[in-house]
C-alpha cells in the first residue's frame, strides 16, 4: 500500500470518528442501506417499546374495523400465521362481535416485559389494551394485543395473539397463538 493510500485511509477513519457524534455516520448508513442492522433496529425497538406496541394495537383495530383480514394477518408473527387456522380464527372473531366495530375509547399503555442475557435484550414484548371497543349494536369489548418486538427466535416477532373480552356477556375469544417464552 502506497503512502498516499495509507494517508487517505487514516483521513477517512479520522473524519468518520469526528462525525460519529453528529449523525453523519447514521446518514451514511441510511444512504447505503445499513440503517436496518439488527443492533440499530433492536435499539430503536427498545427506545420506542410503548409507542411500537400502541401502534400495533391501532393498526390491528383499523384492520378489524375494516374487516381487512389480509392486513390483520400480515401483522401476526410467523409462528401464528404458520399455525394453519388463522383465517378461520379471524372469521370467528368477526362473528364474535355483536355488530360492526366502530370506535374505542383509548389504548392503554402496554404491560411490558423484557429479558436480557449478557447485556443483550433477548425478549421485548408488550400487551396494550384497546379499551371500550364499541359496535353498531351498542356492545362493548376490550381487546388485548400481545406484541413481541424482539425475540431470539424472530418467527415470534409481531402480534402473537388477540384476546377479545365481551364485557356484557363475560365471553372471551383468542385469535392467534399464545407466546411461548
Image (cartoon, helix red, strand yellow):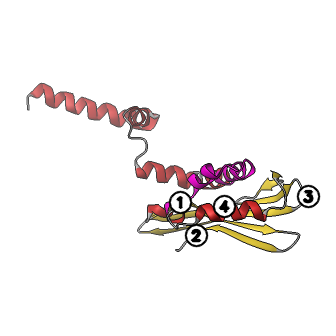
The residue under label 1 is 77
Q: CA distance from mark 1 to mark 3?
A: 32 Å
Q: Quadrant of the N terminus?
A: top left
Distance between the alpha carbons at the discs numbered 3 and 4: 21 Å
> Percent position (x, y) of residue 95?
76, 62
Residue pointed to by mark 2:
177
| Residue at the right extreme of this rendering | 138
* Corner quadrant of residue 127: bottom right
Of label 2 and label 1, which has the lower sequence position? 1
| Callout 2 touching callout 1 (CB < 8 Å) | yes
**Pointer 3: what residue?**
138
Q: Answer yes or no: do the residues labelled 1 and 4 have beta carbons within 8 Å? A: no
The residues tagged by marks 4 and 2 sit, at their Cα atoms, a distance apart of: 12 Å
Relative to 159, does residue 18 appear above or below in the rendering? Answer: above
The part of the chain drawn in magenta is 56-78
Q: CA distance from mark 1 to mark 4?
A: 14 Å
Residue situated in front as seen by the camera: 114 or 36: 36
Amino acid at each position: 500500500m502506497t503512502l498516499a493510500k495509507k494517508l487517505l485511509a487514516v483521513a477517512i477513519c479520522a473524519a468518520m470518528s469526528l462525525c460519529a457524534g453528529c449523525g453523519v455516520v447514521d446518514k451514511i448508513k441510511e444512504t447505503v442501506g445499513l440503517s436496518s442492522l439488527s443492533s440499530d433496529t433492536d435499539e430503536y425497538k427498545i427506545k420506542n417499546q410503548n409507542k411500537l406496541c400502541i401502534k400495533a394495537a391501532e393498526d390491528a383495530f383499523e384492520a378489524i374495523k375494516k374487516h381487512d383480514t389480509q392486513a390483520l394477518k400480515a401483522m401476526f408473527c410467523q409462528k401464528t400465521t404458520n399455525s394453519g387456522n388463522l383465517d378461520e380464527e379471524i372469521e370467528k372473531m368477526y362473528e364474535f362481535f355483536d355488530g360492526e366495530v366502530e370506535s374505542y375509547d383509548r389504548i392503554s399503555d402496554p404491560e411490558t416485559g423484557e429479558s436480557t442475557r449478557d447485556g443483550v435484550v433477548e425478549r421485548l414484548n408488550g400487551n396494550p389494551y384497546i379499551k371500550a371497543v364499541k359496535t353498531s349494536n351498542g356492545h362493548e369489548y376490550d381487546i388485548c394485543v400481545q406484541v413481541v418486538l424482539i425475540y431470539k427466535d424472530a418467527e415470534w416477532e409481531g402480534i402473537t395473539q388477540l384476546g377479545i373480552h365481551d364485557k356484557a356477556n363475560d365471553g372471551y375469544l383468542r385469535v392467534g397463538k399464545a407466546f411461548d417464552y
